[in-house]
Image (spheres, helix red, strand yellow):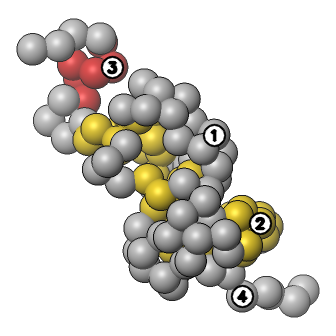
Amino acid sequence: MVRRKANAVVLSDRDNVAVALDDIGQNTLVRVRKGDEILEVQAAEDIPFAHKFAITNVQKGHPIYKYGEIIGKTTRAIGRGQHVHVHNVEGIRGKANRWKTGRRR
């Protein structure tokens, strides 16, 4: 089997984001390693090294999965190939139980 170089990696099959292994420029066709599979995703904007980007469309209010775990929820819809960071995701650290049950403070 030939292993083709990837620019990004998905850490768990459950994840809806990939992590950039290099700086990725807008409109770049990104090769994403997901297990033994290579996905191709066009970067909708610049993605800095080690930052996340969506590998699927994620609706507003939906969870972001990284490491197979929910790390936050979207504050607006995020399209495939868009940068996923504090400008469009609310972290759930310390809020996990309230968010899962729908309770807010």
Gap between marks 3 and 2, in whole Å? 32 Å
Q: Position of residue 64 (x, y in %)?
A: 45, 41
Please state which of the two labelled residues, at mark 1 or mark 3, is closer to the viewer.
Answer: 1
* Residue type beneath disc 1: Asn
Please state which of the two labelled residues, at mark 3 or mark 4, is closer to the viewer.
Answer: 4
Residue 40's tag is: 2
Is residue 9 shown to the viewer in this render?
Answer: no
Relative vertical location of residue 89 with respect to residue 61 in this rendering, above or below: below
The answer to which image quadrant residue 50 occupies is bottom left
Residue shown at the point (79%, 86%) measured from the top left: 4
Mark earlier in primary sequence (4, 2): 4
Q: Dot 3, crowdedness within 10 Å: few (<14), some or many (≥20)?
A: few
Gap between marks 1 and 3, in whole Å? 21 Å
The answer to which image quadrant residue 29 occupies is bottom right
Label 3, on which residue? 100
Gap between marks 2 and 1, in whole Å? 14 Å
Is residue 49 shown to the viewer in this render?
Answer: yes
Apparent side of residue 37 relative to residue 10 in the rendered image (left or right): right
Residue 5's tag is: 4
Residue 57's tag is: 1
* Residue type beneath disc 2: Glu
Relative vertical location of residue 12 with respect to residue 26 in this rendering, above or below: above
Mark earlier in primary sequence (3, 2): 2
Residue shown at the point (42%, 25%) measured from the top left: 61
